[in-house]
Amino acid sequence: MYIFGPVPSRRLGLSLGVDPLLSKSCNLNCIYCELGRSFKLVTERKLFVPTADIVKEIKEFLDKGGETDFITVSGSGEPTLALNLGELITAIRAITDKKIAVITNGVLLSDPQVRRELCLADVVLPSMDSFTKETYIKINRPHGSINIEKVTEGLRAFAQEFKGGIWLEIMIVKGINDNDEEMKRAKEVLDTIPGIKSIQLNTVVRSRAESYAEPVSDETLKRLASILGPRAEVIGKFRNGVIHTIDSVESAILDALKRRPMTAQEFEQSMGMKRQQVEHSLQKLMERGEVERDDFNGKEFFKIKL
Ligand code: SF4
């Protein structure tokens, strides 16, 4: 399967994930990566999966009446490593008018060809966890050929060329980039890139490559966001179909229910969560009077309480 979800997401609404890679392939080895360590870093773009095979699955999903707000190219690693990224976006565009997003670590934005291909999307979500060399190396552990100045210049060039939305993600790791100096440096750079529409602060996922990659509190995220200014917001983390904080689970459930009633099983499948977690969040939302149960056709649905 090259598609997954759709996943309810606070950032993208309902998002159908598309994976153009076969197994973990990345040019970084982030300490917080939920896919585990990158044992061999990949720096060259190549064809992993034929475009037609991926598009066939998307078409089947849509033909069966599958609902989604976004089709999001992300998957098991860095999607810009897929040589057919541009071709894939064009082919998806040919079969649907759904919005297309790409989640990227931003390393290959320094490549003009990659930027041209990303320009075919509606929204691009690059990540940049630090704008200082030492911290970038500590968190993202890049391939030796990657340097932070080049990555930053790639981001700057892309922000000038891209007409769609750029939502930059900064992943905050406790004790590494959770200090004011890091955020002030990020602000200094990001203030010179007005093309970035939103700066989204996240913290570490449940499963991660290194156990020392620890999350920070919501208060810390809010404090750091305030340093970055009005474009910055704190957002619950989800990537590769997994929602990671109770707060973001509840928000994602609410977002999804604004579109249609859903069963606990549907949440379980689309969010990659345990049933107990879904039920716990639904229970809390019902106690707060935000959600109510609605039995229909022998099934137990949940919907927004009006
Ligand atoms: S978090 Fe993303 S960019 Fe970092 S190693 Fe994992 S797949 Fe690559």
Image (cartoon, rainbow, N blue to C red):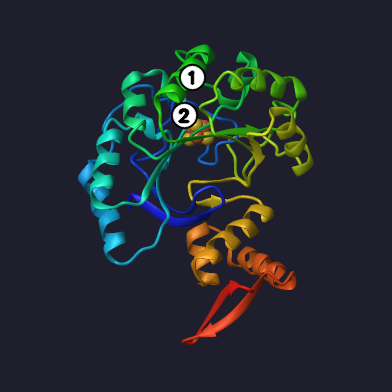
Q: Is residue 281 visible?
A: yes
Q: Is residue 105 above or below residue 144?
A: below
**Residue carrying label 2:** 39
Q: Callout 2, which amino acid?
A: Phe
Q: Position of residue 4 (x, y in %)?
A: 40, 54
Q: In the rendered view, does 148 fall on the left or right side of 91? A: right
Residue found at x 64% / y 39%: 204
Q: State the quadrant of the C terminus.
A: bottom right
Q: CA distance from mark 2 to mark 1?
A: 30 Å
Tell which of 214 and 105 is nearer to you.
Answer: 105
- Read off the residue under disc 1: 156
Left or right: residue 243 versus residue 213 is left
**Mark 1 crowdedness (10 Å alpha carbons): few <14, some 14-19, many ≥20:** many
On the image, which quarter does residue 279 sit in?
bottom right
Residue 37 can be seen, yes or no: no
In the image, residue 85 above or below residue 191 = below
Which corner quadrant of the image does residue 216 belong to?
A: top right
